[in-house]
Image: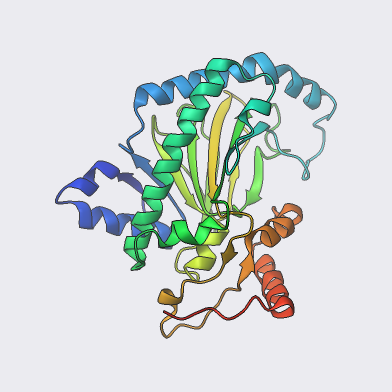
Amino acid sequence: MANFPVINLEKLNGEERAATMEIINDACENWGFFEIVNHGISPEFMDTVEKLTKEHYKKCMEQKFKELVASKALETEINDMDWESTFQLRHLPISNMAEIPDLDDEYRKVMKEFALKLETLAEELLDLLCENLGLEKGYLKKAFYGSKGPNFGTKVSNYPPCPKPDLIKGLRAHTDAGGLILLFQDDRVSGLQLLKDGQWVDVPPMRHSIVINIGDQLEVITNGKYKSVMHRVIAQTDGNRMSLASFYNPGSDAVIYPAPALLGKDAQVYPKFIFDDYMKLYAGLKFQAKEPRFEAMKALEESVKLGPIATA
């Protein structure tokens, strides 16, 4: 199997730009994932984010997780729970950072700055995808915008050592519902895997890299040219794996549909729907195949008639 795609974004500025863009396109078409280095966020700043995230877990979350685990005897396989300790930060359209308990001022400030850097990076990446797809610059950002701008938030997770990883997943297999996902993961403790050609493949931990993956909404907008991919986290017996997954998603009222410029002679395979309707459905079906979700949206589209897709 081909090596997991790792992309040096600095090469976009020189004579290797065309080859680098092709690697990105191939990764989007055939992997649904890629890893970027030299992405413009300094290693020193990422080290600070990691240090404060791990300190926050130790101080505020580790004991709660131990108490939760003690209440769940790991004697038989558990299929309705994940071996993870998490909290959610919302950045856009309105931040909830001030409302999250137990965040000290330094951590709050650093995570706010990190979110701004990731938002900029997400929008730069979306424009690279537009370029590869032959869409006008800014098309994907505009498609995500809705009336109040995109939804953007970070899921902060820790995956502590698990005594019986054969009985529980760190995180069960799923595709991501939203748009573009940017993941800053632990570079020492692995666990993230994606499904490719029927096999589970490790996403390699690399220091100061950011893992990018395609969400369901980009699959719809590209009419299936780029696909979201099933992935999971395997619980490990050693080490505590840190994961900061930031989701750059459409606004709640954004209307999502295949880009007319990509249809050409191809039939429109995917439905037209309001993002919030998809999220309501996804909430109960996250750990199931995505295809029935698309079918349900198609049925909803036919019943409410959101109107035809304008052709370019």
Extreme-top residue of the structure: 59
- The quadrant of the rendering that contains the N terminus is bottom left
Residue 285, image x, y percentages: 73, 57
State which quadrant residue 119 falls in: top left
Q: Is residue 102 above or below residue 260?
A: above
Q: On the rendered structure, is 133 left or right of 75?
A: left
Q: Nearer the viewer, residue 32 or 38?
A: 38
Residue at position x 41%, y 82% in the image: 264
- The quadrant of the rendering that contains the C terminus is bottom left
Residue 149, image x, y percentages: 54, 51
Residue at position x 42%, y 86% in the image: 265
Residue at position x 85%, y 26% in the image: 71
Q: Is residue 37 above or below residue 275?
A: above
Number of marks: 0
State which quadrant residue 139 falls in: bottom left
Residue 73, image x, y percentages: 83, 29
The reply to whether residue 26 is in sight is no
Q: On the rendered structure, is 141 left or right of 283?
A: left
Residue at position x 28%, y 56% in the image: 21
Q: Nearer the viewer, residue 210 or 287?
A: 210
